[in-house]
Image (cartoon, helix red, strand yellow):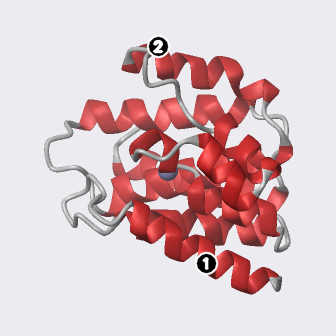
Amino acid sequence: MNDIIKILQAADQAARWHKDQRRKGEAAEPYMNHLLDVAALVAEASEGDTTCIIAALMHDAVEDQDVTNEEIRAAYGAEVASIVAEVTDDKSKPKEMRKELQVRNAPHKSWGASLVKIADKTSNVRSIIETPPPHWPLARKQAYVNWAKDVVAGLPHKPEGLLAKFTATIEAAEAAFGM
Ligand code: ZN
C-alpha cells in the first residue's frame, strides 16, 4: 500500500483513539495536534520513514488510551509496535519513578524511539511556553525543562536538525522561565 495512505489512515485512527483527550495547556488543544506536531518533526528528521512517522502518531495511544501494544502490532506491524513500546511508560509505577526511568533508560533507545522522544519533548516544551497548564507554578515549568534536557541528553541517536530544534526550544524556555 502507498505509504502516504498508510500514514493518513494511522492519523485517522489516532484521532479516533484520542478524540476525547485535550492538551493540558490553557488553550486545551485537541490532543491530535500534539500527535501531528510530533509526527511532523519525526517525518523531517527521519527523511520520511513511514514506520517512524506511524509510531509517532501512535506514541501516546497505549499510555493515555485503552489501546494495547498488540492492537498496534496487528494493525501496523512489529516495528511500529516495538517503537511505541519503547516510548510507553509503565503506568503501574509512580509518576516520579516513571520520570526517573525515562532518564535512566534513555541510552538504550533505538533510532526510531530516540527520534520520537526528542520530538515529543520538543513539542511538550513548546506547549509549556506557548500555552502552559494554568495551574503550573514557575518551578514546575523549570523542572519539566530540566527533565526534558536530561532525557534527551541520554539518547544515543540525535539527528542534527531535530536536535537543533530541541535545543532552540530549550533556550526559548530558559529565557521565558528565567533559567
Ligand atoms: Zn506525547
Callout 1: SS: helix
Instruction: Determine which quarter of the picture holds residue 30.
Output: bottom left
Q: Which residue is mark 1?
A: 9
Image coordinates of residue 131 in percent, x first then y, are 28, 61
- Foreground mark, 2 or 1, reads 1
Mark 2 Cα-neighbour bin, 10 Å: few <14, some 14–19, many ≥20: few
**Three-letter code, disc 1:** Gln
Image coordinates of residue 150 in percent, x first then y, are 61, 28
Mark 1 Cα-neighbour bin, 10 Å: few <14, some 14–19, many ≥20: few
Residue at image coords 82%, 74%? 48
Residue at image coords 35%, 52%? 128
Residue at image coords 49%, 50%? 61
Q: Is residue 83 visible?
A: yes
Q: Which residue is mark 2?
A: 97
Q: Name the side, left or right, on which 10 lies relative to 125.
A: right
Q: Looking at the image, is 67 positioned above or below residue 86?
A: below
Callout 2: SS: helix
Image coordinates of residue 17 in percent, x first then y, are 42, 61
